[in-house]
Image: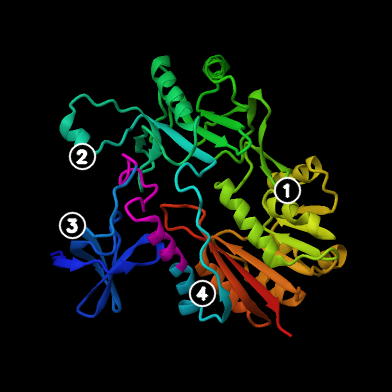
Amino acid sequence: MARKKKIIEQIEVLDFAAEGKCIAKHEGQVIFITTPNIAPGDLVKLQINRKRKNFSEAIVLERLQDSPDRIEPFCSHFGVCGGCKWQHIPYDMQLKQKEQQVRDQLLRLGKLEIGEFHSILPSEKTQFYRNKLEFTFSNSRWFTREEINDNNDFDKDALGFHVPKRFDKVLPIDTCYLQEDPSNAIRRFFDTYARQSGEPFYDHVKHEGFFRNIMIRTASTGDTMVVVQFAKDDIRLIEKCLGDFVKAFPGITSVNYFINQKRNDSYQDLEPHNFSGQPYIEEEMEGLRFRIGVKSFYQTNSDQAYELYKKTREFAEIGAEDVVYDLYTGTGTIANFVAKKAKRVIGVEYVEDAIKDAKINSEVNGIDNTSFYAGNMRDILNDEFIAKEGAPDVIITDPPRAGMDKEVVDMLLKIRAKRIVYVSCNAATQARDLQLLSEIYKITDVQPVDMFPHTHHVENIAKLVLKA
């Protein structure tokens, strides 16, 4: 017989926790609340779903009284689509929580000694700040409870976002506040066109259909890229669709497509086809032009990426005779951004296509003091590589969420560069790596940066200086 789950009839939400969760305390024990759309100060009814020695996990059964800090979300899809989960939290509170999140990971959990902890850099834009969005076609629309109660005639086709934890269910989007126009207009065009064409929206269970996915990229230069994934190799239907799109949106810089007949939406292993315009768009930063191709990675908040890179360059203190290593360089954006300050910059990245983009970005900007290498970081960064390229005076590292492999950290300890600037999207793994590096480095500065308003995600920069 299943054990009855404990109910707490009334309890106040006390604070935020990591990963956007909230916490309460009951009978001396911490309770992590996993239900979204909850705010400190809310009075709630909880169900304990999981109990451990030192903590419990619970869901909210009912919100009894709203927090005085709670604000009205600006998006009609809030709470359903799974994005922008902190719309009900004032932006200044979001910033305080993100800054505290970094403090907790580095100081309380990592037990690191830090020089100056700078206040978080806010994002000037809190809406329409993203330069890239992807929308999915599905013949299995997600219906809200209100729609089920109010409507008997269900149209099951949808173009929008996957709802959390459901690979097959897509919530149709009316207006998205993440990306500037013409993003919403482009999505609405393809939604209308697909319905009128009679060709099927994709079935994510049977893996059948025609319309599968669209990606929209925008840039501060005014460039716009559209990439459509079709699930059927029918050039007549594809050309008719994209031809009508170009007529409706003649100013679009780049129109491309994939034919994707795999069982997932990933496209890195597929060949892109350019239908109209250039196969890339361009972003601009301090007079530098960065080409962004169909498969290119670029920071999704362009304006805030500039602030991130400026602070990274400031912390690096690059001199005219310095050799700089940019590890996990991606498309070489940071490497090219700091190149004018350095004698030489060497970028390393495991994605070959990204390194091709990095080399092109150096070439189109007339930068001749960069070199780029593709391969696994722990394999490339060895004694032979250092002997060939020269020992770095400054290292900039911006690894993925998992942080750096221990072999890479060990190599950095062996290299003993004068300064390391560590950029991270995950303060927990950053703290782990900084603990190891603190053997010979002192952390002089920490700078959190908000790249994604209305989410719990936070970027962080740490400056390390070699101990005397």
Going from N to C along the chain, the mark reached first, 4 or 2, is 4
Which amino acid is tagged 2? Arg
Which amino acid is tagged 4? Leu
* Residue in the image at 83% along x and 59% along y: 344
Specify whether residue 177 is painted magenta: no
Q: For residue 308, which quarter of the picture? A: bottom right
**Nearest-to-viewer mark from 4 and 1:** 4
The answer to whether mark 3 and mark 1 are in CB contact below 8 A is no
The percent coordinates of residue 99 (x first, y second) are 47, 66
Q: CA distance from mark 3 to mark 1?
A: 50 Å
Q: CA distance from mark 4 to mark 1?
A: 32 Å
Going from N to C along the chain, the mark reached first, 3 or 2, is 3
How crowded pointer 1 is (Cα within 10 Å; few <14, some 14-19, many 20+) is rated as many
Q: CA distance from mark 3 to mark 4?
A: 34 Å
* Residue in the image at 46% along x and 27% along y: 185
Indicate the secondary structure of the residue bearing disc 4: helix
The label number, if any, that marks residue 145 in the structure image: 2
The label number, if any, that marks residue 106 in the structure image: 4
Which amino acid is tagged 3? Leu
* Residue in the image at 36% along x and 67% along y: 17
**What range of the chain is rendered magenta?**
75-99
Indicate the secondary structure of the residue bearing disc 1: helix
Indicate the secondary structure of the residue bearing disc 2: helix
Between 405 and 360, which is closer to the camera in this rendering?
360
Going from N to C along the chain, the mark reached first, 3 or 4, is 3
Going from N to C along the chain, the mark reached first, 2 or 1, is 2
Between 264 and 190, which is closer to the camera in this rendering?
190
Q: With 26 as the anchor, is 338 left or right in this view?
A: right
Q: With 269 as the anchor, is 204 left or right in this view?
A: left
Q: CA distance from mark 3 to mark 2?
A: 16 Å
The answer to whether mark 3 and mark 4 are in CB contact below 8 A is no
